[in-house]
Image: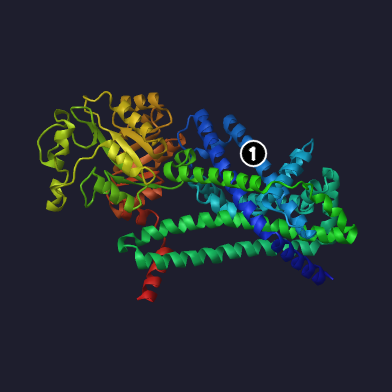
Amino acid sequence: MMKGKMKTSLQKTGRILRFNFRNVLLFELIYRMFTTMASIEAVSRGTVFALKKAGYSYLTSKNIGPFLIRPATLIVLIGLVIMEAFFLSIETAALLTAYQGAVNYEKVNPVKMLMGGVVKVIRSIGKETGKKSGLVLAMALFMNSFIIARLLAHIRPIDFLLSEIGKGTVIRWILAGMIVLLFLFIFPRFFALHSCYMEELSWKKAVEKSRNVVRTYFPTTIITMLGVNAGVVASLIIVYLLFVVGTGVVVVLYAAPNLRTAVMLMSCDRIEIVLLYFASLISTIVNYGALTAIYSEYEKVHYVEESLNVFLPIKKKINKKMKTGAFVLVFLICCFYIFNVVKSGTLLARNAILNTQITAHRGSSYFLPENTILSLEKAIEEMADFSEIDLQETQDGVVVLLHDSNLKRTTGVNEKIWNLTYEQVSGLSAGVGFGERYKEVKIPTFEEALMLCTGKMNLNIELKYNGRDPDLPKKVVELIHQYDFVTQCVITSTNLNFLRKVKELDSEIKTGYILSAAYGKYYEDEAVDFISIRSDFVTENMVTNIHSYGKGVHAWTVNSKAELERMRLLGVDNVITDRPLYAREIIFREKATESLLEYIKSVLR
């Protein structure tokens, strides 16, 4: 008997999923794209607001706990939860609209799905809305638990917090107990949303009916849901491995030998994030399809099948041009937002530290002239997250890239930068110490650096203090605004007044105080978002203290393997190095990646 129910359930699941699959997939892709972009923006703005109220500049492993329980943070979290519950409710109701169409052999296009979802959610609004929304969120957590866990592992403060929690046996048992309780809450209510959204039953009647369905199809429901979710996870792992191997082959065949490990490390990370996103989408489609198959089978046995026609409230035809226009508009808005995120980054990325980042010191300056377009291009090629540059003004007020006040070390001309016009400076060679090959390399302007790096690499902009350029902060901030570079840069200086001026001009720009040694509570100043300090002085206690204030730690100039590994173990947020490619390999090295590359190389020989 049970075997027969299982076979019927699986067959019906397959038919329901196949019948409207293209329309469902199209709807999910566009709807998820739109809601994801909206969610990222809301989370970004909410994070910035909550961080300001908490007096933090960044989320770190040390401050994320206190940050989460602050009133402003709780208000933001509640708002975000309500927004996500609304988005998920519409998505769930839209999927159920499509699946009921499949049950009754009726094609349901994406617009009809959306309208059906919106109508169902609006009709279900009432005093029981909170219970329905809570179930929608709980179902999303259940269906995507593995995916959510993997995504959280990419957010360093949360991953650190979870790993620390996981060290305690008692805490692990508590978490396991919470997961069991979540399942026990959801299981009897697996089909309540079908009754609420499709048949518009009250919450009490919907839960009662769901329990009847579960009792009737108890083993079938358990085995089907476990099988479906295990299948999604297994498929995700297999596809991930195929992509990784494929990427490894491409890297071995086409990437420069010195770039291979770094390219693989970054590629594997990005492949996983993209696949997790699509796995979440597929998981939702498949899970609700399987549940609808079981629910409709119960309805067929206990009621008349035609009673399910109430699932399709949208009968009015919609003009084809209107449908096409609406979807094209939503798609274009999403594409524009994605382009903007890729080009300029997001507020969230600046405030939630995802990984230890790599900054190329004066560009990739180990083998190339520092503070030049050439060294910046090399830093981009070597996948540096940031490039540190030094800014000063010429006699006629042009902002240029130059570290020393005197030009002798880099150009061979014994003259101060403030004594020469830009025309005179532009005639000098910035590659004197690197032989004839680089004698034509020039000192670039800040504008040239901005034009090169927009959408390609972030900049750590150091304002050099020489006592002669009091307007340097203002000029630099104006140029940053002109090139829409706020989300792509941080500004540093050894001079606190410079940093305070920057904050007065634009409080959104992140600022770092450069120190050679650490004395006192220098990190408490409101004009300081992070500390940039010589790596020799970085200690575990220092990193802990600075992180507890919600500030970051950047360490310079870190070139040796031992020091790079020490910075990684101490949890610094950014390492500034002359060798960005080497630093990435050391800090993010994975033996599995190296072994895979070696194996692929041997096979392809």
Is 264 placed above or below 541 here?
A: below
Find residue 421 and report its horizontal and vertical position in percent.
16, 30
Q: Residue at horizontal 63%, vertical 62%?
A: 232
Q: Residues within 10 Å of mark 1 (few under 14, many from 20)?
A: some
From the image, tell me which residue sits under label 1.
83
Look at the image and tell me whether residue 516 can be seen: no
Find residue 309 and report its horizontal and vertical position in percent.
83, 53
Residue 362 appears left or right of 223: left
**477 and 448: which one is in front?**
448
User: How many callouts does the rendering have?
Assistant: 1
Furthest residue in direction right, as rendered: 303
Residue 232 appears left or right of 242: right
Is 526 placed above or below 363 here?
A: above
**50 and 455: which one is in front?**
455
Look at the image and tell me whether residue 129 can be seen: yes
Is 224 placed above or below 577 here?
A: below
Disc 1 element = helix
Q: Residue at horizontal 61%, vertical 62%?
A: 233
Find residue 224 and report its horizontal and vertical position in percent.
73, 63
Q: Residue at horizontal 64%, vertical 35%?
A: 78
Colouring chosen for the image of the structure? rainbow
Question: Which picture quadrant has residue 237?
Answer: bottom right
Is 166 placed above or below 429 here?
A: below
Find residue 444 and report its horizontal and vertical position in percent.
23, 40
Q: Amino acid at mark 1?
A: Met
The image quadrant where one finds the C terminus is bottom left
Question: Which picture quadrant has residue 108?
Answer: bottom right
Residue 569 appears left or right of 218: left
**220 and 96: which one is in front?**
96
The image quadrant where one finds the N terminus is bottom right
Q: Residue at horizontal 57%, vertical 41%?
A: 38
